[in-house]
Image (cartoon, grey):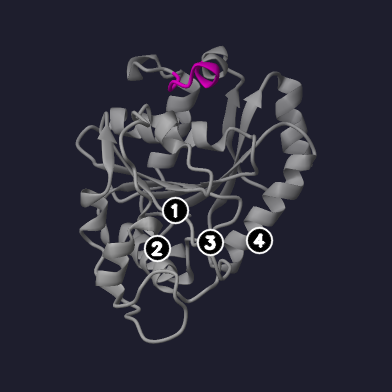
Amino acid sequence: MSLKLAFGGKGGVGKTTVTGLIARTIAALDKERAVIAIDADPVANLAAALGIDETQPITPVAELSDLIAERTGAKPGTMGGFFTLNPKVDDIPDRFSLEKDGVKLLVMGTVQQGGSGCICPESTILKALMNHLVLARNEVVVMDMEAGVEHLGRATSGSVDALVVVVNPGKRSRVAADKIRKLGQDIGIKNIVVLGNRVASEQDKTLIRESMPDYPILGFLPEMDEIIQADRDGTRPFDNPDNIPEEVVRIARKLMALDGSNA
């Protein structure tokens, strides 16, 4: 399996929790396959969703100053000048990730200056690393993106099996989904689907369907008391993978069936 999934959504919809649950579920369903979870959101919370001890040092790739300087030939924080645009990155996932229950976490971090499109050593490393993860690794890669898709580029977009836009019931979800879909389409992602989260009733499902009639609906996940409690406690929900709800398992199986199809 070489499955590449990106999850997007505006803040507060439960995107990171969903991303973590899907990554863990895929790892539990197919223990023979490696799963890499990429935290590409500036507000990095995927470690907690995966149950990784946050007291362990997790240095975002964008902050590995010595490594970036070594691989690009330029000091981080600089712009202009000469540096390699094709740095070596294939060892980074194994060297700088943390693993729990078959899921490796890699935190990307953000470029602190120059805007999302800057040409600088940090952005060069991040783009090269994302290209490597999506194009060269024969693994399941699950990406928790920010509201945009800045870490993805045209070179990688054609190999993303799905961009999953997580939404809550309500017409405002349409606005956020439209923005994310446009960003995804602009770089060539073909399969963009909606996942309704925190759905409390059939009326909520109908509201999502009617407000987003031109989106493929991947499915719906209900409001779950355990997730609310885990949020309060700072723990991951459903610590025992055997207790992950069937609704989540069904969504994970649907996504696993997309492997290599880009349809």
Could you tell me residue 52's position as x and y percent?
Answer: 34, 30
Q: Which mark lies nearer to you, 3 or 4?
A: 3
* Front in this rendered view, residue 15 or 121: 121
Mark with earlier residue (1, 2): 1
Q: Amino acid at mark 2?
A: Leu
Residue denoted by label 4: 182
Q: Amino acid at mark 1?
A: Gly
Residue 11 in picture, x, y percent from top left: 64, 40
Indicate whether 243 appears above or below 74. Answer: above
Mark 4 secondary-structure assignment: helix
Give the spatial CA distance, label 4 vs label 2: 22 Å
Left or right, 92 with reference to 258: left
What's the mark number on residue 109? 1
Quick one: SS at disc 3?
loop
Tag 3 residue: 150
Q: Which callout, 1 or 3, points at the residue further toward the start of the chain?
A: 1
Q: Which residues are magenta?
A: 230-237
Q: Which mark is residue 126?
A: 2
Q: Residue at x 68, y 19 (%)?
A: 200
Q: Residues within 10 Å of mark 1 (few under 14, many from 20)?
A: many
Q: Residue at x 39, y 72 (%)?
A: 121
